[in-house]
Image (cartoon, grey):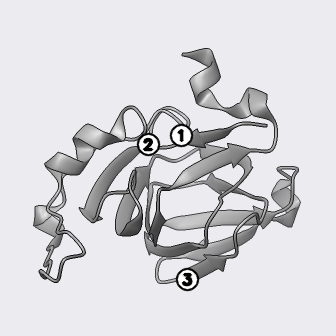
Amino acid sequence: MRIASIFATGLIGLCGMASFASAGGTHTLVTPDDVQWGQAPKVLPTGAEAAVLFGDPSKEGLFALRIKVPAGYAIPPHTHPVHEVVTVMSGTINIGMGETADPSAAKALPAGSFIALPPGTAHFARFDEPTVIQITTIGPWAIKYINPADDPQKSQ
């Protein structure tokens, strides 16, 4: 299985679109009107949008990233090499643990919910309504799909 660096291609340009600061001690303030959405990285299934709020997910260090998905969106089972800390900003994420996307094993987490997954935790997500999640973690961020054929970059 291959680890796909989520920002190796498409999202590096997105970093410049968002308001972000280095870890060098400057502060960052972002209002909802400041969030600038762009195409999500190609390692995610088509249809998502992303906005970097802080840091650079392609580099070592702390970052905050929002991902906006439409109703019917799904992310197949995958893992991350670092802790993943997710807050549901709006909508609902149906998240399940394990290497198989079993909808009956997913738990619906509405806006305001919090998720913290240790490195290597296999999980999947489904969204029945438009949803925005925020990921805050240490980069570089990557996704390793359990089934390499699920990696959207393979079909590009």
Numbered circle sitting on residue 114: 3
Q: Nearer the viewer, mark 1 or mark 2?
A: 1
Give coordinates of residue 85: x percent, y percent.
Answer: 54, 75
Label 3 element class: strand
Indicate the amino acid at tag 1: Leu
Residue contact between numbered discs 1 and 2, judged by CB atoms under 8 Å: yes
Q: CA distance from mark 2 to mark 3?
A: 20 Å
For the C terminus, the image quarter is top right
Q: Which one is earlier in the sequence, the residue at label 1 or at label 3?
A: 1
Q: Residues within 10 Å of mark 2 (few under 14, many from 20)?
A: many
Q: How many marks?
A: 3
Numbered circle sitting on residue 48: 2
Q: Which residue is at a point 57% across and 25% down the rendered structure image? A: 153
Label 1 element class: loop
Pointer 1 residue: 44
Numbered circle sitting on residue 137: none
Q: Which residue is at a point 88% across and 50% down the rendered structure image? A: 100
